[in-house]
Amino acid sequence: MSNLQWPELVIFTLLFLLVTVLGFVASRWKAGNTLDHLDEWGLGGRKFGSWITWFLLGGDLYTAYTFVAVPALMFGAGALGMYALPYTIIVYPIVLLPALRMWSVSRSHGYVTPADFVRGRFGSPTLALLVAITGIVATMPYIALQLVGLESVLRTMGLNGSGIVGHLPLLIAFVILALYTYQSGLRAPALIAFVKDILIYIVILVAIIYLPIKLGGWSHIFDTAAAKFDKTPAKSDGILLNGNNQLQYATLALGSALALFLYPHSLTSVLASRGRSVIKRNMVALPAYSLLLGLLALLGYIAITAGVKPINNNATGKPDSNTIVPVLFDTQFPSWFAGIAFAAIGIGALVPAAIMSIAAANLWTRNIYKEYIKKNATPGQEAKQAKLASLIVKFGAVAFILFIDPQFSIDLQLMGGVMILQTLPAVALSLYTRWFHRWGLIAGWVVGMAWGLIMLYGIPNPANGKKHFGGSALPLGDLSIFGWHPFAGSAVQIYPGFVALVANIVVAVLVTLVARRLKVVNGTDQTEPEDYHADEHDKDLRPIGAH
């Protein structure tokens, strides 16, 4: 810790203190009668307008890890890292209509989580439990990845000790986050998101204009990146895609787009909005973040030209590729601007971490605690349980960082994306049709989940010597269906989550056909067709905060 960057550290700390104050003040911002109700604590009173929702969703979906990992992937693998750009472009048209229907039916019935909807749609506590557990398990490593992003900044500023001392600044930051989230609920990240997004836009726009001028222009930057990848042994690396990774690129982008709004934290931000018109405006405006992401990704190529070297993680003894962007800012900008950039990334970790922990806490409270432990829980007891659960989730994520190699958190998040995708038939498709039988959806979930994890387990990473969970690119030649290899010998790669989802839907259809033939009861649907079109001004709409 002897190489502390004091100017950067001071600016980072001051901005961090600003958002801490905002986090505590947020409990009185747009406050309802009480925070002892999930409608208020977990969904901000369900009354956020267009601007607040835009910043909240942007802060939720474009995380600190995105800001460090996408350029790092471009730095290490080239064009494949750009998959994040088409995926965040196509996601909004895909989810616009399902998001509207989910908002309406949730507002009509007081649903707080996607598992609440599934419980009401099929009358199946088992299916709702599977959706809830999937959401919680997929969210935990996602929170841990925000810490990976925050630690990359702290490490660059010289806070790179080994053991528990090296993690102390991170622990302090998350204790503060836990306290103001506990007090203010979803209002805290909603208010802080304003600061985070303004800082991020300033930093990226300055970087994308200033750095190319300083380093010889875009032509030179792309030539330097191409020269680097020409020397690497991996055939999939390069500034252009090739025949082997184009299918992987397309299925990864589509699979990620389908998965994004299945994550509980994404739906939490949607359900917190005031009405359908707010969601429509946001789905039109949110691609502005994709422009930002595209510019951000190019920092990976800029880092190659600047000769950036990742910092060694003293806790593991290995280079930390996630420090690429922080090191780039540290070496190419004055200390004061680097401090602002680091604060932008650091605050960018707190906003999604808070929303994710709230979403996971809502799932625990509504779909496990109230369903199986205390069926007659009052709204106040639910809110108390959610607050406590949000603390446990946050510190569980911190434990990932303290006791497990951060690389394992990345692997777990990779698994989380494949897992959350398996809830698509039960959550997204069921917004439109109740044709699927609940036992078909359960069987499809089991098959998709099992096969997806088996495929991921079998993917090695020769670069770091890992034999299992080495990436998200499965060669079609390795695709096995009960020992049969339909594409034997093919080097073309595909995203395993997409393959698992196809298997999930096929099994769900087959089991549904059998269940219908046997006339197996499909539970009770609590929803009505008009519930899916309800809006904020409907006179018979369920009051916010109703028991």
Image: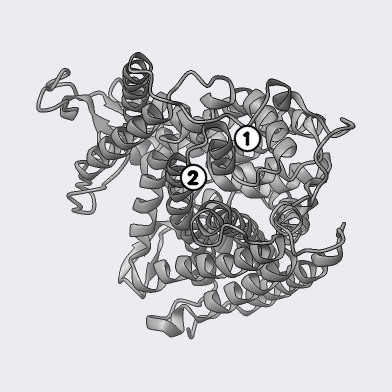
The numbered mark, 1 or 2, whose residue comes first in the sequence reads 2
Judge whether residue 411 can be spotted in this image. yes
Q: Amino acid at mark 1?
A: Ser
Judge whether residue 213 can be spotted in this image. no
| 321, 53: nearer the viewer | 53
- Crowd band around label 1 with a 10 angstrom C-alpha radius: few (<14), some (14–19), many (20+): some
Q: Which residue is mark 2?
A: 70
Which residue occupies 62% across, 32% down?
Answer: 526
Q: Is residue 430 above or below residue 47?
A: above
Q: Amino acid at mark 2?
A: Val
Q: Position of residue 50 (x, y in %)?
A: 82, 39
Q: Quadrant of residue 496?
A: top left
Which residue occupies 65% across, 39% down?
Answer: 292
Name the element at disc 2: helix
- Report how far apart the C-alphas of labels 1 and 2 lie in the structure: 12 Å
Q: Quadrant of residue 421?
A: top left
| 266, 68: nearer the viewer | 266
Q: Position of residue 339 (x, y in %)?
A: 66, 67
| 98, 15: nearer the viewer | 98
Name the element at disc 1: helix
Q: Which residue is mark 1?
A: 290
| 293, 92: nearer the viewer | 92
Q: Is residue 412 left or right of residue 52?
A: left
Q: Is residue 145 above or below residue 184?
A: above
Q: Is residue 30 left or right of residue 312?
A: right
Which residue occupies 54% across, 39% down?
Answer: 119
Q: Position of residue 184 (x, y in %)?
A: 75, 66
User: For the view shown, which residue lies furthest in the left direction?
Assistant: 483
What numbered label is drawn on residue 456? none
